Image (tube, rainbow, N blue to C red):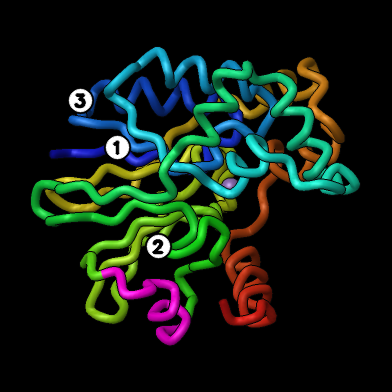
Amino acid sequence: MRIAALYDIHGNLRALDAVLAEVEREAPDRILVGGDVALGPMPRETLDRLLALGDHVTFIRGNCDREMAAPVPGAAASAWGERTRWAAARCTPEQLRLLASLPTSVSLEVAGLGRVRFCHGSPRRDDEILTRLSPEPRLRAALAGDEHRCIVSGHTHVQYDRVALGRRWVNPGSVGMAYASEPGAYWAMFGPDVSLRHTAFDVSRVADDTHAAGFPDAEEFVAKYVLTRPDPGEASAFFEKMAEGAPAA
Ligand SMILES: [Mn+2]
């Protein structure tokens, strides 16, 4: 089976549309949506687009999907808490029930790669930080005994493909909210090898969509994540610092 992995779409419908046009040409057996699908400027429309593809799409749940489906009390006090509440209010009850019901990971047989673990943060947590810089002891802990030779995760929005602990670790990158030097959508094809992809989309139209939708704190979001993006090296280093400070799970 060949799989197109689309992670961290974050309600960016234009980025998703651009990627789906390329995915169609690839004709994969399945599209794997790797979590954090809806939290962004066009949450309902993004889910509608993917749900229209029916059984062709397999979803796993990311931390933001979990938080949209089951709001954390007090979370709305922060900008992202407010955006989470806003995005959940835009979705249909059926969509929120779907987000709540999703599995946190799946294991799929991929041509040329064997069984591949697809998860959002790590096999054990939807919000675990893994980057191309993560040291082996943290990778080992994050595996939590998982024996797959290929681990695919997202959450940190920087695309990479690395080998550590005798396994392959891949982050397909983020479709809708990439931390990357070049603008665009990042994703990956699996089978028979791993192929990292980059697809251009019109960022100025996404900026317009974001304002028109009334996304909370749109100005800040557009400046930081749409018209420019966090630098991938700085973002990874920042995440590693966060992970070191986090209590051992
Ligand atoms: Mn995310």
Identified by mark 1, the residue type is Ala
Our reading of the magenta stretch's main secondary structure is helix
Question: Is ligand 1 within 8 Å of the beta carbon of the residue shown at mark 2?
Answer: no
For label 3, the SS is loop
Three-letter amino acid code at the position of disc 2: Pro
Q: Does the residue labelled 3 lie within 8 Å of ligand 1?
A: no
Q: Real-space Cα distance between discs 2 and 3? A: 28 Å
Between discs 1 and 2, the one toward the N terminus: 1
Crowding around mark 3 (Cα neighbors within 10 Å: few <14, some 14 to 19, many 20+) is few
* Residue 184 visible to the viewer: no
Vertical placement of residue 141 versus 97, above or below:
below
Q: In this view, does 192 lie to the left or right of 59?
A: left
Q: In this view, does 13 lie above or below 197?
A: above
| Disc 2 versus disc 3: nearer the observer | 2
Dot 1 corresponds to which residue?
4
- From the viewer's perspective, is residue 228 above or below residue 202? below
Please check the rendered image and state whether residue 142 is part of the magenta-colored stretch, yes or no: yes
SS at mark 2?
Answer: loop
Q: In this view, does 14 lie to the left or right of 135?
A: right
Q: Position of residue 74 (x, y in %)?
A: 86, 48
Is residue 65 rendered magenta in the image?
no
Q: Where is residue 145 in the image (x, y as percent from the top left)?
A: 32, 75
The residue depicted at 37 percent of the width and 72 percent of the height is 143
Q: Which of marks 2 and 3 is nearer the N terminus?
A: 3
Q: Name the residue under label 3.
A: 27
Q: What stretch is highlighted in magenta?
A: 135-146
The residues tagged by marks 3 and 1 sit, at their Cα atoms, a distance apart of 9 Å
